[in-house]
Image (spheres, helix red, strand yellow):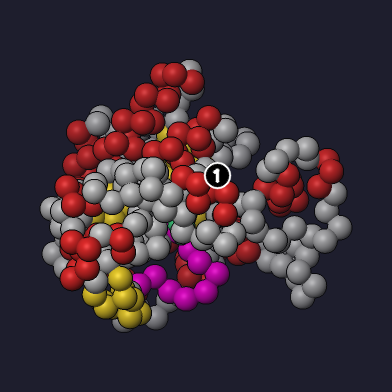
Amino acid sequence: TGSAVQAEKHDDFVIVGHRGASGYRPEHTLASYELAARMGADFIEPDLVTTKDRVLVARHEPEIGGTTDVANHPEFKDRKKTKLLDGVAVTGWFTEDFTLAELKTLRAVERIPAVRQHNTVFNGHYQIPTFQEVIDLSKRLSKELGRPIGIYPETKHPTYFQQQGLALEPALVRTLNRNGLNRPGAKVFVQSFEVSNLKALHKELRVPLVQLTSASGAPYDFVVSGDKRTYADIVSAKGLREVATYAAGVGPSKDQVIPLDATGKLGKPTALVADAHKAGLVVHPYTFRVENSFLPADFDSSAVASDSGNLFGEIAAYR
Ligand code: G3P
Ligand code: CA
């Protein structure tokens, strides 16, 4: 449908290592991505933000107070600021205020130590990777593991960065071009919550794009432009047909696919998957992880013997 690059059709699931194997290593580190690939992920998923000198690096947020040791660096004490990030006041240190060389002096720490205490033993071990380093890793692991390890980059807060004269799109396109990855058949998906960003990328990229949606709210670029549509509108049958004009897939929050009922059990599936398939879109829901507690109370997790029992159990329950 439309003119969007079509995603390869899969009969089965694709497994995306969300922020790497983030239940086992601090997220968005090369160690986390590598472990995800070794655990069987088809893709590794870097969230992308930019440095002051326009280098794409992997962090979930521009603010890095909780995911690096920046607070322990007296030389960066004065960089602490309060900024409006997608309309919300956030205090901390922001990647766009650091050069790549400065960011490389920092080390990653576990974002949610209370939940992932085991990960804190790796605090201080790993640098913030550049997007190029993530691509290099995927190439090396593809050779070593004998199967293609894809990349599934997400542009984070593109309007926020654009407003500061640091648009993510040109750097993303340049990096994919430089690596021979901007072509049909490359094992690459590019995803974003923002619509205008994906539409702009659609003109430049020959890899499939994925429109992310959330269970509530609206894309920030819609808020800025005064577009009144919400994520709920985007996942309506009509909205999905529009998505298919610039993207090959939709990445909904999993509770937009199967909501929980009042008792916390999996409820009835919505029409999202059928509507998306009708529009010619693949569906890549997020996020299944060990610490989620969305399993139905009566789910038999003894059937899935693994230290990741909850994770695989949860996937099995949804399946
Ligand atoms: O793949 C979708 C997912 O990455 C979006 O969630 O964790 O980046 O906020 P997140
Ligand atoms: Ca992401």
Nearer the observer, 240 or 307: 307
Q: Secondary structure at mark 1?
A: loop
Does 62 lie within the magenta span? Answer: no
State left or right for residue 29 relative to residue 272.
left
- Tell me which residue sits at (43%, 45%) in the image: 45
Q: Nearer the viewer, residue 252 or 78?
A: 78
Q: Nearer the viewer, residue 197 or 82?
A: 82
- Where does the image place residue 207, in percent across and percent down from the top left? 35, 40
Q: Which residues are magenta?
A: 209-220
Amino acid residing under circle 1: Tyr
Q: Position of residue 77 (x, y in %)?
A: 22, 68
Q: State the residue at coordinates (19%, 42%).
A: 174
Asked whether residue 187 is in view, the answer is yes
Q: Residue at x 75, y 62 (%)?
A: 266
Q: Give above or below for 232 relative to 23.
A: below
Q: Quadrant of residue 224?
A: bottom left
Number of marks in picture? 1
Rendered residue at 53%/59% (across/down) = 113
267 in relation to 198, above or below: below
Residue at which label 1 appears:
24
Nearest to the observer: residue 149 or residue 95: 95
Q: Quadrant of residue 158?
A: bottom left
